[in-house]
Amino acid sequence: MTAPDAFSEPGQPEIPRRRLVVAGAIVGPDGRVLAARRVDVTGSGHGSRWEFPGGKVESGESPREALVRELFEELAVDAVVGAELVHPAGAWPINESLEMRVFVCRLTDASSGPTMGHSHDEVRWCTPSELLRVDWLPADVPVARELASPGTLDDLLGRAHPGTEQASSLAPADRRRQESPSPSDVPRCPVLIANPVAPGHEQLVSLLEREARTHGWPTPRLLLTTADDFGGGQATQALAWKSDLVIVAGGDGTVRRVADVLRGTRVPLAVVPCGTANIFARNLGLRRRHLQRAVETIFNGHDVAIDVGVAQVRLASTSQFGGEQVFLVLAGMGHDAATVAGTRHGLKRRLHWLAYFESGARHLLARPLRMTVSVDGGDAHESTVWSLLVGNVGRIPMGIQVFPGADLQDGHLHTLLAHVEHWWQWSSVAAAALAPHKKFRTLERGVAVTLHATPRTPLEVQLDGDVEGPVTQAHFRVEPGALLVRVPRSSHFRESAPNSPSPTPVPDQSPRTRSLP
């Protein structure tokens, strides 16, 4: 956060606002922090002393954008900017004309170390305790002292440390606000889980910081997803911090993994759509291009309980069932999953959800598949299908209703068997998109609390765009009212989930961990 605006008293000259500088505490994979020795090219007397690298924020840049640029210009490194080390006054003072904001950073390629440029002649990696023995520039001394304090780096990096029940990187003023009585609608520990490669993630962080100050909220803690953990581990960490609001900035896959951890906890989930299709967010009334509306919903929306779909599959490679997984939008088995798996990543980056059409066109004439389906414990029936879809929401992009009447609070899953065996039958599928309530022989719709599917040959399954398999069996069920989500106050959702049928209980087993035959 930047320092509060300075106000001059009547009759006194106006105090000029300081120019903002940003600095990065770059943390390596082993937890050591990078220090860079300054070259004295201006004759300021600061040469041969050490600093946290960074530079001035230019006009039109956010602090985080400026820091990414400065680190690349000074050290030729690409960095992901994480949590901020906040000064009690908002920014760290340098002199009468400059103030500094400090952020923890990670390198996107840890194997590619910094390269010396015109600003520095040496770098070193320091443990927290070694930071106290470095000859820092005066402005960096208090920053180094704070980073060397036990637990500070762990807090900023989103790791629990011994002896601390709840980590916090809030400024002292925010800590006092958090510990004092507050309105019931102000969270004590909001956490933002963000995909660092999602477009607009830097803008969102800055916007949330500003809105948090406006609404008197603690600054949301930031946890970034990684190539090895797409959201589940971050959500688990948020619960360890006793977070009472988890904000997710990402696509359907990231949201799904966070929801899998939050279901049943009564901790609300707020969504900022930043992914390819963002179908779940669309069904909440949120759009990718309307970032401000999503942020307004975080601070002014209300929480509703919605249903989630739960899937468990038997992998062909192991002949064993894996753990249960949540899906919020839809699950697909057959050529639908093959379409998702075949979508080119380059097209997804450029075309977003339209990229799926290119892959779908390549699978339109694929050979129909045979599978056996049983609904709600009834008799199993074998069908010839192009794909099986099991949905939790009604709409996909372009307003197409795949499951007319589907409601996130209706206590059911909605099913669709696409019986497409010949190319001309796709005309009726297209007509169904224009007239979703009309019946077509090629599309067999229904509702279910549970559904079991067994393909004749192993097939892939997709859950909200994440592909599993091939699998030899797939079991799906609904978990009514299992997840709290924050929605716009103008939305159609009911304040609490209706009384809905629950999954058939299994004696002495939790519904979240029960096994399947």
Image (cartoon, grey):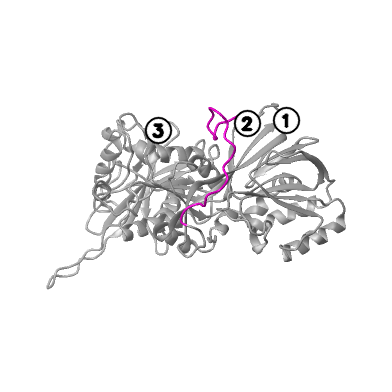
For the C terminus, the quadrant is: top right
| 481 w.r.t. 239: above or below | below
Q: In the figure, is residue 432 to the left or right of 96? A: right
First along the sequence among labels 3 and 1: 3
Amino acid tagged 2: Gly
Q: Which residue is mark 2?
A: 322
Q: Which residue is mark 3?
A: 31
SS assignment at label 3: loop
Please rate how many residues cluster around mark 3, counting C-alpha atoms within 10 Å: few if below 14, some from 14 to 19, many from 20: some
Residue 451 falls inside the magenta stretch: no
Residue 47: image quadrant is top left
Q: Which residue is mark 1?
A: 316
Amino acid tagged 1: Ala
First along the sequence among labels 1 and 2: 1
| 275 w.r.t. 9: above or below | above
Q: State the image coordinates of residue 96 (x, y, percent, origin top left).
A: 22, 58
| 31 w.r.t. 278: above or below | above
